[in-house]
Amino acid sequence: MLSDEVWRELRDQGASRTFRERSVMLRQGSEGTHLLALTDGLAKVVYRAPDGVMTWLAFRGPGDLLGEVSVFHGTPRTAEVVALTPCTAVVLEAQRFRRFVEERGLVMDLMREALHRLRESDAHRTELLTLPLVVRLARVILRLAELTCPGAGSDGVRLTGLSQEEIAQATGVTRNAVITGLQRLREAGAVETARRVIVIRDMQALRGWAATAV
């Protein structure tokens, strides 16, 4: 992740724009004429196959860059970014962003961020193959809490905008399995849930579930 100083300077390179909940922020197949610096809200990255099947790829939160790959490669976007909650982002024109990166010597920083995302994706795939549902579910909730509330370590963190189907995609299970997993976490006092809302009631308990390997 870019330093706070660089992030502030980067935000000054473009204009702020708001996105409604469930609106498309970046459309798959469009040209990489710009990227977004997400400053507020929660978004998801998805891939839409030609047959219409949608595959979840990642969640993104404040401090994340969106669409930078197509900007650097000069190729159409290979994925779509959708706002899960109302989002605010700075729109950065491609040429101006590339010039900013070169002038500030940020190529290595962005490469490290890309490698971090790759390792994160590999770790997620491993979890899907090796960990029980409730463990994966607890880890997804913790990651979302960190995305929306960086440094979150206390109870009461409120996550909004997520459907059970989206959580199911992120954990690699069915919607019914997510319902069962959330029920176990509720019974343990770790979370409370409502329609598209998850409230972390006991962070320590949730971390205990996430740390369980078997």
Image (cartoon, rainbow, N blue to C red):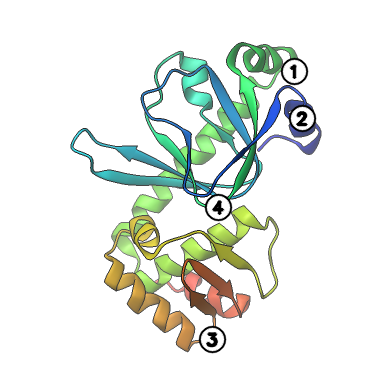
- Depth check, front residue: 63 or 26: 26
Is there a contact, CB below 8 Å, between mark 1 and mark 2?
yes
Which kind of residue does numbered mark 4 sit on?
Thr
Q: Residue sitting at 44 percent across and 46 percent down?
A: 58
Residue furthest toward the left? 51
The tag earlier along the polypeptide, 2 or 3, is 2
Q: CA distance from mark 4 to mark 3?
A: 26 Å
In this rendering, the label closer to the viewer, 4 or 2: 4
Q: Is residue 212 left or right of residue 48?
A: right
Residue 120 position, x and y percent, is 47, 46
Dot 2 surroundings within 10 Å: few (below 14), some, or many (20 or more)? some
Residue for badge 3: 189
Quadrant in which the N terminus appears? top right
Which quarter of the figure is the C terminus placed in? bottom left
Q: Is residue 24 above or below residue 6?
A: below
For label 4, the SS is loop
Q: Give the mark nearest the N terminus, 1 or 2.
A: 2
Amino acid identity at mark 3: Gly
Q: Please tell me whether mark 1 or mark 3 is closer to you in this view.
A: 3
Amino acid carrying label 2: it is: Val
In x, y percent, where is residue 158? Answer: 61, 68
Residue at image x 70%, y 23%? Answer: 14
Say what secondary structure mark 1 lies in. Answer: helix
| Label ID, residue 6 | 2
Name the residue that disc number 4 marks. 85
Q: Using the rendered view, name the quadrant where residue 66 is placed.
A: top right
- Using the image, tell me which numbered label, if any, was put on residue 104: 1
Q: CA distance from mark 2 to mark 3?
A: 40 Å
